[in-house]
Image (cartoon, rainbow, N blue to C red):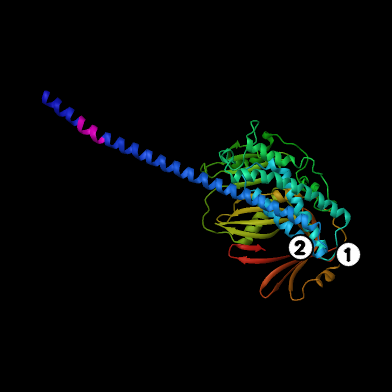
Amino acid sequence: MADNGFHLNDRRRSWAVPLAVIAILALIGVSVWGYYQNRQLNRLQVLMTNQYNRAFVDLSDYVDNVEALMAKSLVTSTPVSTSKMLEEVWRQSNLAQTNMGQLPVAPPILEKTSNFLTQAGDMAYSLNNKTMNGTPLNDKEYDALKKLHGYAVSLQKNLQAIEAQVIQGKMSWGNYTNKGNFMVASKAKDPQTSQFENIDKTFQEYPTLIYDGPFSDHMLKSKPQGLGNKKVTVSEAKNIAENFIGKDRVSSVKQLENNDLGNIKTYRFKVMYKNEKDDESAEVEVTQQGGQVYLMLRNRGIGKDTVNMEKAKKLAKDFLSTKGYKNMVDTYYQKVDGTAVISYAYKQGGVIVYPDLIKVKIALDNGEIIGIEAKGYLYNHKTRSIPKTTLTLEQARSKVNNRIKIDRQGEAIIPTNFKTEKYCYEFMGKVDGRTFIIYINALTGAEEDVLMLVSTPEGTLTM
């Protein structure tokens, strides 16, 4: 018995050695993994910080350029010189906006600053179009430009103060990056948040309208036209989301965090399908005002194509019709990973209204509608008062370059870069194998826009 006990203890000791080794190796492995992960995290944080620093410094540089160019435009002696300066103001303002959008700062904190840059660029573009034809600025336009320049100087000084801290390493983006891509404003303000809010306070007294033209600030704050007036509750919105998918297909609906940014605020829901995998759910956003479906996107695997584009267009149009979107015509499409995203525009009488746009995503394996985005339609849709044309179709056609062989023509309302609309004749034609669309203003005869269509295996793109 003693001999057996000796062997049993010996076995235990023999097992203990490899177990201890395994434990030590595991501990070393965890330590190495932790070190590696921490190193990767630190490296990522450094990269993000460098990216934010570069975006901010570039933003500051572009605002410097905007200020200098505006100052020069106020002292130029000829309309042509003024035009050159204003064209560059427009470009630099857009670049400043782009870099500001890359900063990890919630949009509301710099909303007024963003609006200022937008208006500065839009106004510069408008005045550039006037002065490039040899017409000088009138007194009202000059005064408006001078006021804009004054605000540009204030913005420049505020940004330069923060830029000095960035260069000296005193500005930390960590407070932002730890909170995700967008910083959420809270009652407990950190110094960096206060600095950006102080920049925006520069524009607290900024006039709502300092330029009596199509690009004034009231256009930037225009309200969505296609929502309706009714406020809907969460319960009502949940029911709308369920009905949109089809109650017979839905197993459950879970409310997600609301989307309260922007002019169209929505309730968000995760919709689970009956007899489907949990990861093949859909997200549906319903507008808090009007109870309209703003977005629906279903996540699921896509099989082999069995539906051609003509059938896909018909299925998508029929779907829109059942959801109350009548008189919609397909315009462009793009094929991506076994799906087609088809754009539909509203048609009022014989006029295609391009701002009233809905995008439909359809799976080409079975024709299921797996996505819809109604932002353009909900933001812009209304019954237009279409003016009587002052040009006939033939008169407008005569203004198109005679080298273009016109294949199609019609009437359209097109959006501009400045949140306005133009009533035009639309001409599609070819030159040297390339397809173009030319828009001639139906009231003035001016050539409003030229688009080039590029055909790819995935669809037709506009340039």
Residue carrying label 2: 84
Q: CA distance from mark 1 to mark 2?
A: 33 Å
Residue situated in front as seen by the camera: 425 or 320? 425
Quadrant where the C terminus lies?
bottom right
- List x then y, in percent, for residue 331: 69, 60
* Foreground tag (1 vs 2): 2
**Do we see residue 262 in this rendering?**
no
- List x then y, in percent, for residue 360: 65, 53
Residue carrying label 1: 390
Q: Answer with left or right where residue 146 lies relative to residue 283.
A: right
Q: Answer with left or right where residue 184 lies relative to residue 443.
A: left
The structure residue drawn at horizontal position 73% and vertical position 50%, both measured from the top left corner, is 117
User: Any magenta on residue 13?
Assistant: yes
Earlier in the chain: of badge 1 and badge 2, it is: 2
Disc 2 marks a residue whose amino acid type is: Lys
Please, what is the dominant secondary structure of the magenta stretch?
helix
Quick one: SS at disc 2?
helix
Magenta stretch bounds: 12-18
- List x then y, in percent, for residue 31: 38, 38
- Characterize the local packing of mark 1: few (<14), some (14-19) or many (20 or more) Cα atoms within 10 angstroms: few
Residue situated in front as seen by the camera: 362 or 432? 432
The structure residue drawn at horizontal position 55% and vertical position 48%, both measured from the top left corner, is 50
User: Any magenta on residue 190?
Assistant: no
Q: Is residue 445 above or below residue 49?
A: below
- List x then y, in percent, for residue 14: 20, 33
Q: Is residue 400 above or below residue 325?
A: below
Residue situated in front as seen by the camera: 31 or 266? 31
- Characterize the local packing of mark 2: few (<14), some (14-19) or many (20 or more) Cα atoms within 10 angstroms: some
Disc 1 marks a residue whose amino acid type is: Thr
